[in-house]
Image (spheres, rainbow, N blue to C red):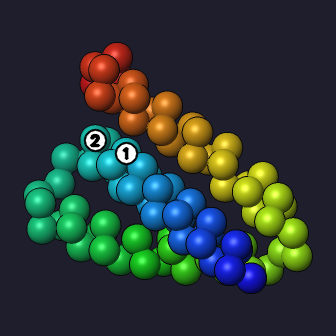
């Protein structure tokens, strides 16, 4: 149970950060609107990922869903940072 909690927390934190940075690059919003979207979206995404981790018996099953999304989001972030995607 502790392994699910710790890994789910770390994966949800990194995935949430990566997705919110993608939103920041894609949408030209003011800082206040972006912070509101990040706050509300962060809580909802964290709750969804923790629910996925607790719904499965084995730890490998939710990681199979979350890690590919994290890899794609991190790749898009890398493309934004390097300037390939503008």
Left or right of residue 75, residue 48 in this image:
right
| Residue that appears at 88% across and 76% down | 57
Q: Residue 30: x and y, percent?
A: 11, 58
Q: Residue at the location (78% across, 52% down)?
A: 64
Element under disc 2: helix
Mark 1 falls on what kind of element? helix
> Is residue 17 placed above or below 1 in the rendered structure?
above
Where's residue 6, x and y in %?
59, 72
Mark 1 touches mark 2? (CB < 8 Å):
yes
Drawn side of residue 35 relative to residue 5, left or right: left
Disc 1 marks which residue?
22
Residue tagged by mark 2?
A: 25
Q: Residue at x 46, y 64 (%)?
A: 13
Q: In which quarter of the view is residue 62 placed? A: bottom right
84 left or right, relative to 68: left
Depth order, front residue of 47/85: 47
Query: From the viewer's perspective, is residue 65 above or below residue 68?
Result: below
Cα distance in 3D space between marks 1 and 2: 5 Å
């Amino acid at each position: 149970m502790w392994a699910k909690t710790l890994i789910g927390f770390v994966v949800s934190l990194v995935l949430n950060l990566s997705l919110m940075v993608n939103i920041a690059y894609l949408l030209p919003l003011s800082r206040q609107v972006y912070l509101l979207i990040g706050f509300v979206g962060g809580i909802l995404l964290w709750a969804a990922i923790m629910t996925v981790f607790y719904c499965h018996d084995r730890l490998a099953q939710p990681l199979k869903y979350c890690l590919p999304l994290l890899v794609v989001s991190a790749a898009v972030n890398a493309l934004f940072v390097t300037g390939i995607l503008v």
